[in-house]
């Protein structure tokens, strides 16, 4: 599949890379921080709706838009570090949802069987031994590791 980045996506990725770098751990942490902020504002929105505080909604909705944008930006940048782009991911998501309409187990990756019959869960991924090494950006990027893997 051809990797497609539209001009806005490319501009965002280039900007975020120049401003924030490509360290996977720091970018993931930033993404999760933005998701938490979105969660908090969404809860504030639901509270306003449930308690008839309708006069607060315009300001909260403006804040929601800002947080959705932050999540989108950090997600776009993080995904690009794995050479993934919006259109491709949307197509994959649509494929999964429609595939599961036929087969509920379509593209479920949480468990798989090894040749020896052992069932392995993706939730049991070994922890990194040296998180400081990863945070200091001394570990190769996922894209670099992928390229090395393709060569071997």
Image (cartoon, helix red, strand yellow):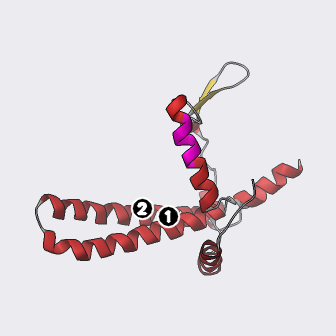
Q: Residue furthest left?
A: 52
Q: Nearer the viewer, residue 84 or 24?
A: 84
SS type, badge 1:
helix
State the residue at coordinates (59%, 46%): 127
Q: Are marks 1 and 2 in contact (CB under 8 Å)?
A: yes
Indicate the position of residue 75 as horizontal and vertical percent values: 53, 63
- Seen in the picture, residue 149 relative to 42 is either above or below; the reply is above
> For residue 52, which quarter of the picture?
bottom left
Q: Please, what is the dominant secondary structure of the magenta stretch?
A: helix
* Residue 7, magenta (yes or no): no
Residue occupying image coordinates x 58% and y 37%: 122
In this picture, is 99 found above or below 89? Answer: above
Read off the residue under disc 1. 31
Give the magenta part as a residue range. Answer: 93-99
- Residue 132: in sight, yes or no? no
Secondary element at tag 2: helix
Q: Position of residue 35 (x, y in %)?
A: 42, 62
Picture residue at 65% right of the left edge, 77% below the top: 14
What residue would you read off at disc 2? 35
Is disc 1 surrounded by few (<14), some (14 to 19) or many (20+) residues within 10 Å? many
Residue 96: in magenta span: yes
């Amino acid at each position: 599949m051809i990797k497609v980045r539209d001009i806005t996506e490319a501009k965002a990725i280039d900007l975020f890379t120049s401003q924030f770098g490509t360290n996977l751990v720091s970018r993931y942490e930033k993404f999760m921080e933005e998701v938490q902020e979105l969660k908090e504002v969404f809860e504030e929105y639901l509270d306003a709706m449930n308690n008839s505080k309708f006069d607060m909604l315009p300001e909260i909705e403006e804040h929601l838009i800002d947080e959705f944008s932050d999540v989108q930006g950090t997600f776009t940048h993080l995904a690009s570090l794995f050479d993934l782009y919006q259109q491709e991911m949307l197509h994959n998501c649509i494929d999964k949802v429609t595939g599961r309409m036929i087969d509920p187990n379509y593209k479920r990756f949480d468990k798989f069987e090894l040749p020896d019959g052992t069932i392995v869960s993706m939730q049991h991924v070994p922890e990194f031994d040296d998180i400081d090494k990863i945070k200091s950006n001394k570990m190769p990027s996922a894209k670099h590791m992928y390229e090395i893997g393709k060569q071997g």
